[in-house]
Image: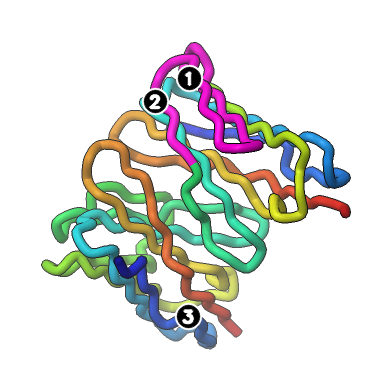
Amino acid sequence: GQQVMQIPQYQHVQEGEDFTTYCNSSTTLSNIQWYKQRPGGHPVFLIQLVKSGEVKKQKRLTFQFGEAKKNSSLHITATQTTDVGTYFCAGQGGGNKLVFGAGTILRVKS
Amino acid sequence: KAGVTQTPRYLIKTRGQQVTLSCSPISGHRSVSWYQQTPGQGLQFLFEYFSETQRNKGNFPGRFSGRQFSNSRSEMNVSTLELGDSALYLCASSLVDGANVLTFGAGSRLTVL
């Protein structure tokens, strides 16, 4: 079945450094979504990418969807302590099923 | 607009017991999905319901079941609880527009002793 791999599993950065998490699907996706889960919280929707090669920005966050619609990335510029949490990608393939990656835990040292 | 409401928020059970968790979706959302979250396994999909019908199902044993009512509220049940069932159970609702953007509830934290 469809699998979504996400790396790295964990990243610890100094405040002000950049951060990137990558997501790869075993199958072509119709869309990919990104969620953020703060420690002790629940996942919150960040963004959805639908088009091949799409790039979207939200302030310091940049999201990309690959040309083949099988991979995606989330890049955070100049991390802040408020960025801590787990970032999940979720790919939607055939059958309308949304498959989550394992998540990347981001810790920021101030 | 009220968010996704899950009850109870915390519960403790012993092995062999059964548990029922409840989820009230956002008003107007007709799809409800359930996920199990554990530290080592991330978000594992349990099942999705739409219009009282199970539309998708994950790879969990038959001890895990669910249902959806005509008002879109959903329940999930776990019978014969095992220690490994200790987890955060998350419910998420979505509009059925083909995009399935999920709004999660705060979760029900189940501890099995």
Asked if labels 1 and 3 touch by Cβ distance under 8 angstroms, the answer is no
Q: Chain of mark 1?
A: A
In the rendered structure, the answer to whether residue A104 lies left or right of residue B78 reads right
| Residue under pointer 1 | A54
Which residue is disc 2 drawn over? A50
Residue drawn where x is 15% and y is 60% of the image: B52
Q: Residues within 10 Å of mark 1 (few under 14, many from 20)?
A: some
Residue A54 in the image: above or below residue A63: above
Give SS at disc 1: loop
Q: What is the secondary structure assignment of the residue under circle 2?
A: loop
Does mark 1 fall on the same chain as mark 3? Answer: no
Q: Nearer the viewer, mark 3 or mark 1?
A: 1
**Which image quadrant is residue B22 in?**
bottom left
Name the residue furthest top: A67
In the image shown, does A43 or B83 lie closer to the viewer? A43
Q: Residue at x 40, y 19 (%)?
A: A51
Residue at mark 2 to residue at mark 1: CA–CA distance = 7 Å
Q: Is residue B40 left or right of residue B45?
A: right
From mark 2 to mark 3, how far is it between C-alphas? 34 Å
Disc 3 versus disc 1: distance between alpha carbons? Answer: 38 Å
The residue to which callout 3 is attached is B9
Q: How many marks?
A: 3
- Residues in magenta, as a range: A47-70
